[in-house]
Amino acid sequence: MSGLIEDVCGRIESSKEDLAEIALRLGNTYGPLGNEEPTARVAYEWYRDNGMNADLVPMIEGRASTVGLLRGDGSGKSIIFNAHLDTEASGPEYDKLMNAPDPNKVGARRDGDHLIGHTVQNDRGCMSVQMVAGRAIHQSGTVLKGDILLKSAAGETGAAPVDEYQGMQYESKGLGTTWMVDRGYTADYAVIAETTDFSASWVQCGATYFKVSFTGRNMYTPRLERPDGLADHPNAIVRAAAVVTAIEAWAIEFEARRTVETPCGTMAPKAQVGAFRGGLPWRPNRSSTYAALYVDVRTLPGEEVAPIHRELTAVVRAIDPAASVDITMSKAGFGATEEGIRPLIETIRNAHEYVRGEPMPDKAEPAVVSMWRDTNVYNRVGIPSLTFGPSRGQAAVQGTGSMELNNMIEGAKIYALTALAIGGSITLGM
Ligand SMILES: [Zn+2]
């Protein structure tokens, strides 16, 4: 048994350059949200080139996921490692409306032992970590008891169809992972391979997107009449702007009121206005007859959305009684049961201690606990799931932080030992 541990860890240790190479290759493949197939194919070909089984799982033109497959003899428990292919939106709309370097075009680069770039940090670095872990097990030649599934999932990051942006191209948040679960790619446990600084979270927030719409009257600037109250202002943009301020104040209070302690850390469900539209940029001489705000509200597991909808509507209508508030996407958060997740969390704790020589952190940072991750897809269908992975450095602002190769190698060893221990091929912590 210990021979297998040393063999697999040794293979991973000597895979450092390979790990950097596949992480950068994935990170520099142009495959934004809605167009993940090119990156899915890179992962698929990598498995095939390494003599491993893999399935390409297409959804629609341009969108596909990949599953690397290590089949066991069926006598042990099975486990999924699940990373996501999409990193961010991209294309002319992104360039025009976000006015910032497109992370999909910036890609990733190496500086010494650091991998820099948002595509690697989220989430092709952890994808590479699980691929290298799986390959080491494959190359050890051990006959597995339980299956190991290594998923590269399309459509995890936040997006939802709205306005003229309709159809499957804009579906996300669990799309590819749900699709694969529905195709039968399931297991006894699932590890969502994302950066967590080696902490684990088996509860995650959900998310609901709202569209707030305003109507106005078309008035030429010299003829503009400003009534006393905002509610009667002819310009929809003016009322929308006031509502942005009100939603900001509400979001702060709403988050504080619902912040809870979980076994994995503090869950603080935030909200923000993420987009705004109204008027014709090339003709500002008219008050806008239309404006809209697009709001992202994070939800607690089990929290009902209808009361949030009513509360947000009240905030909006206190300023503009005629505004409408519509839900454009709603996906619930979930948590694994303590009993269900215990064997997996104890295995990861033991693997972490073995590899890193110290206890794993017992709490994840609030942002990790309070975001959407594909953990929700598995916990929703009763497959105990948690998110766990190496560090991306301090990266609250996109474009900062990096992944360190030795840190990723440690992550790969922990993944591999976890898979082998869950399947019953090795025993840890004895
Ligand atoms: Zn991610």
Image: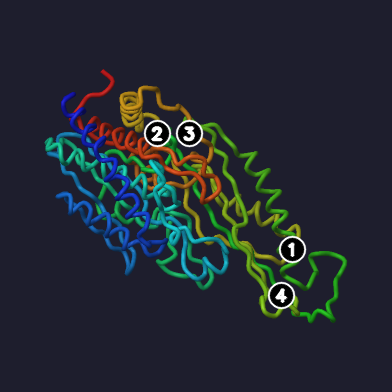
Left or right: 233 as drawn, with respect to 303? right
Does residue 359 sit above or below 142 in this rendering?
Answer: above
Q: Secondary structure at mark 4?
A: loop
Q: Secondary structure at mark 3?
A: loop
**C-alpha separation, residue under disc 1 versus residue under disc 2:** 43 Å
Residue picked out by circle 3:
364
Residue picked out by circle 4:
288
Dot 2 beta carbon under 8 Å from ligand 1 = no
Residue picked out by circle 1:
320
Does residue 145 sit above or below 28 in this rendering?
Answer: above
Query: Pointers 3 and 2 in contact (CB under 8 A)?
Result: no
Residue picked out by circle 2:
337
- Tell me what residue is drawn at x 45 percent, y 27 percent: 362
Q: Position of residue 412 (x, y in %)?
A: 30, 37
- Tell me what residue is drawn at x 21 percent, y 56 percent: 55
Q: Nearer the viewer, mark 3 or mark 2?
A: 3
Left or right: 292 as drawn, with respect to 6? right
Quarter of the image where one finds residue 1: top left
